[in-house]
Image (tube, rainbow, N blue to C red):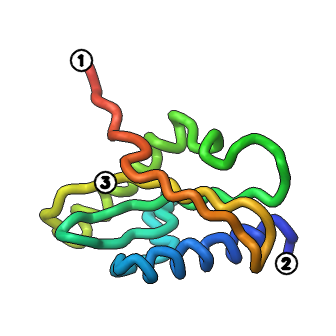
Amino acid sequence: MALHYKLGKEGETAAVNYLKERSFRILHLNWRYGHLELDIVAQKDDELIVIEVKTRSGNWDSPESAVTGLKISRIVTATDCYIKHFDIDLPVRFDVICITGSYPNFQIEHIEDAFYPPMNVY
């Protein structure tokens, strides 16, 4: 297994543990629809929360800077598919969890409402 893939999986596991400790109900991990993917889909307090996890081991750019406009668009499109597929009628929040360092000493930053779905203007 490539080291970056292993680090990413360890980061996602740390994020899931972090969320469970805070009473989030994990609905799906790495949910896919075609080429689209949602890292973590959770629920808390009657709200659907879609969480993008970004893991970095060194002092490179900040993990949250990897959540670009294109990535946001893909997450929002995948979330729309998820909501329709499971017939969900809840408000949606988009969070980012940034994991830095190395296992087991990760530093975790949880950014709630990290972004909002872009509005299409016609």
Q: Relative to 104, does residue 99 appear above or below in the rendering? A: above
N-term-proximal mark, 1 vs 2:
2
Q: Which residue is mark 1?
A: 122
* Residue, disc 3: 93
Query: Residue at 86% across / 70% down in the picture?
Result: 3
Kindly indicate whether the residue at mark 3 contacts the one at mark 2 (C-beta within 8 angstroms).
Answer: no
Residue hosting label 2:
1
Nearer the camera: disc 1 or disc 2:
2
Residue 88: % across, % down: 18, 67
For marks 1 and 3, give the one nearer the viewer: 3
Mark 1 vs 3, N-terminal side: 3
Q: Amino acid at mark 1?
A: Tyr
Q: Label 1 vs label 3: CA separation? A: 25 Å
| Secondary structure at numbered mark 2 | loop
Q: How many marks?
A: 3
Residue placed most toward the observer, 48 or 33:
48
Mark 3, other Cα within 10 Å: few <14 / some 14–19 / many ≥20: some
